[in-house]
């Protein structure tokens, strides 16, 4: 997949996001594009290669959705503009750590990444503010 020209890879990603297409439809469509671009035959996608790529993309998408949920939770707890240097620092550290965790998970799908722990750590300052 990494060797595909950028326009074909973008089309592949768009087809995967579409949700209405089967993997066979995507496989046929991308392999047709590869032929139209006169690329070598060994660049044709295989079913297993497409399935692995689709699984990886879905995993990254899931992580991005989780990151968005965590960010929304942070905004609701800390507000759009966190007050205080500590809140801003924790928010930035948390975002960075969540992104790194997502990338580690994408590179090593079998490695367990505890995104919930990072989320809980990021929400801790708001709990401190509520204490009497």
Image (tube, rainbow, N blue to C red):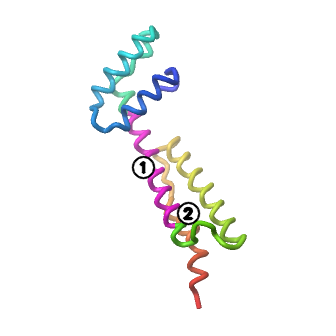
The answer to which quarter of the image holds residue 88 is: bottom right
Q: Residues within 10 Å of mark 1 (few under 14, many from 20)?
A: few
The answer to which quarter of the image holds residue 96 is: bottom right
Residue 105 place in picture, x, y as percent: 51, 47
Q: From this viewpoint, which residue is outermost toward the right?
A: 85
Q: Residue at x 36, y 31 (%)?
A: 15
Q: Does 94 lie within the magenta span?
A: no
Residue 109 place in picture, x, y as percent: 46, 44
Q: Residue at x 39, y 11 (%)?
A: 35
Q: Is residue 97 above or below residue 88?
A: above
Q: Is residue 126 left or right of residue 47?
A: right
Which residue in the structure is indicated by mark 1? Answer: 62
Which residue in the structure is indicated by mark 2? Answer: 118
Taken as a whole, is the magenta stretch helix, strand or loop? Answer: helix
Residue 44 place in picture, x, y as percent: 40, 17
Which residue is more in the foreground, 1 or 32?
32
Stretch of the chain drawn in magenta: 52-73
Please count the marks in the image: 2
């Amino acid at each position: 997949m990494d060797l595909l020209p950028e326009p074909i890879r973008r089309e592949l990603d768009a087809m995967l996001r579409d949700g209405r297409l089967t993997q066979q439809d995507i496989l046929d469509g991308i392999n047709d594009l590869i032929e139209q671009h006169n690329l070598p035959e060994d660049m044709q996608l295989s079913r297993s290669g497409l399935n692995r790529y689709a699984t990886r993309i879905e995993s990254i998408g899931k992580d991005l959705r989780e990151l968005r949920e965590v960010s929304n939770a942070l905004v609701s707890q800390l507000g759009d503009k966190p007050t205080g240097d500590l809140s801003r620092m924790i928010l930035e550290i948390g975002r960075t750590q969540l992104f790194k965790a997502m990338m580690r998970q994408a590179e090593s799908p079998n490695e367990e990444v505890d995104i919930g722990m990072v989320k809980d750590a990021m929400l801790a300052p708001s709990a401190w503010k509520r204490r009497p």
